[in-house]
Image: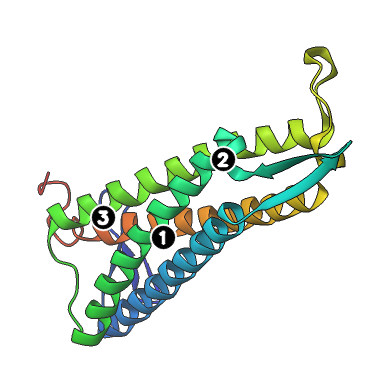
């Protein structure tokens, strides 16, 4: 079965055929480069928004400062997004070099490593977002059964800026999921061709 230069291998893995293979590879590499760059920027924005977030409130002449280190979930979010920023920057450099030199990823072990790291980063980002969202929901809506109060009523600016950082992290995670899918495509394309499943 062929359409638009795409065939299906015996293992149901899309395999590119035809003369436009280099053009498709170049577009794929450029898309990956742009998505990884956007992930890097959004993860960095999340780190900066959350890590610089603080607000001082005065209660009967006593000043109380809210900062991101008061919530361990936000600390976890900052650490994971910092890791995502560094990882994405390394991948941007690799993709940029690939685009400039015109080289194609041909090494199966390297492709497996990239896919594994992309998936690990996506799962870590999801875990950090989940914990930060849970803490944010408690801060916004309280938990009367546990006698937790609505912290965001007192620290509105702090909650808003943290929410912006979490939102930026969510978009970065969604893009990381797309990038992991592209890495999966790049890997399993290496197993295509006329060999079928004999390469396993």
* Tags 2 and 1 touching, CB below 8 Å: no
130 or 156: nearer the eye?
A: 156
In the rendered image, which residue does mark 3 sit on? Answer: 114
Residue 43 visible to an observer of this rendering: yes
Query: Which numbered marker is on residue 69?
Result: 2
First reached walking from the N terminus: tag 2 or tag 1: 2
First reached walking from the N terminus: tag 1 or tag 3: 1
First reached walking from the N terminus: tag 2 or tag 3: 2
How far apart are the two marked residues, 2 and 1, measured between alpha carbons? 20 Å
Residue 44 lies, in percent from the top left, at: 49, 62
Element assignment for label 1: helix
116 or 18: nearer the eye?
A: 116
Point out the residue furthest to the top here. Answer: 145
Q: Quadrant of residue 22?
A: bottom left
Q: Quadrant of the C terminus?
A: top left
Residue 122 lies, in percent from the top left, at: 43, 47
Residue at image position (38%, 70%) is: 32
Near mark 3 (Cα within 10 A), the count class, few <14, some 14-19 or many ≥20, is: some
In the rendered image, which residue does mark 1 sit on? Answer: 85
Q: Is residue 151 above or below residue 42?
A: above
Residue at image position (56%, 57%) is: 46
Residue at image position (60%, 53%) is: 50
Near mark 2 (Cα within 10 A), the count class, few <14, some 14-19 or many ≥20, is: some
How far apart are the two marked residues, 2 and 3, measured between alpha carbons? 32 Å
Q: Is residue 102 above or below residue 112?
A: below
Residue 34 lies, in percent from the top left, at: 44, 75
Point out the residue furthest to the front here. Answer: 61
How far apart are the two marked residues, 1 and 3, measured between alpha carbons? 15 Å
């Amino acid at each position: 079965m062929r359409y638009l230069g795409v065939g299906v291998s015996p293992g149901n893995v899309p395999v590119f055929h035809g003369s436009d293979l280099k053009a498709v590879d170049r577009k794929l590499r450029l898309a990956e480069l742009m998505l990884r760059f956007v992930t890097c920027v959004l993860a960095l924005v999340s780190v900066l928004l959350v890590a610089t977030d603080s607000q001082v409130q005065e209660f009967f002449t006593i000043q109380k400062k809210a900062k991101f280190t008061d919530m361990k979930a936000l600390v976890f979010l900052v650490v994971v997004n910092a890791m995502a920023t560094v990882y994405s920057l390394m991948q941007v450099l690799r993709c940029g070099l690939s685009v400039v030199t015109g080289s194609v990823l041909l090494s199966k072990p390297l492709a497996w490593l990239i896919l594994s790291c992309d998936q690990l980063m996506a799962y870590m980002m999801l875990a950090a977002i989940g914990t930060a969202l849970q803490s944010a929901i408690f801060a916004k809506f309280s938990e009367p059964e546990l006698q937790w109060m609505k912290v965001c009523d007192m620290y509105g600016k702090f909650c808003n800026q943290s929410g912006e950082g979490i939102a930026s992290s969510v978009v970065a995670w969604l893009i990381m999921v797309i990038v992991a899918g592209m890495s999966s495509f790049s890997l399993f394309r290496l197993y295509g061709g006329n060999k079928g499943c004999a390469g396993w």
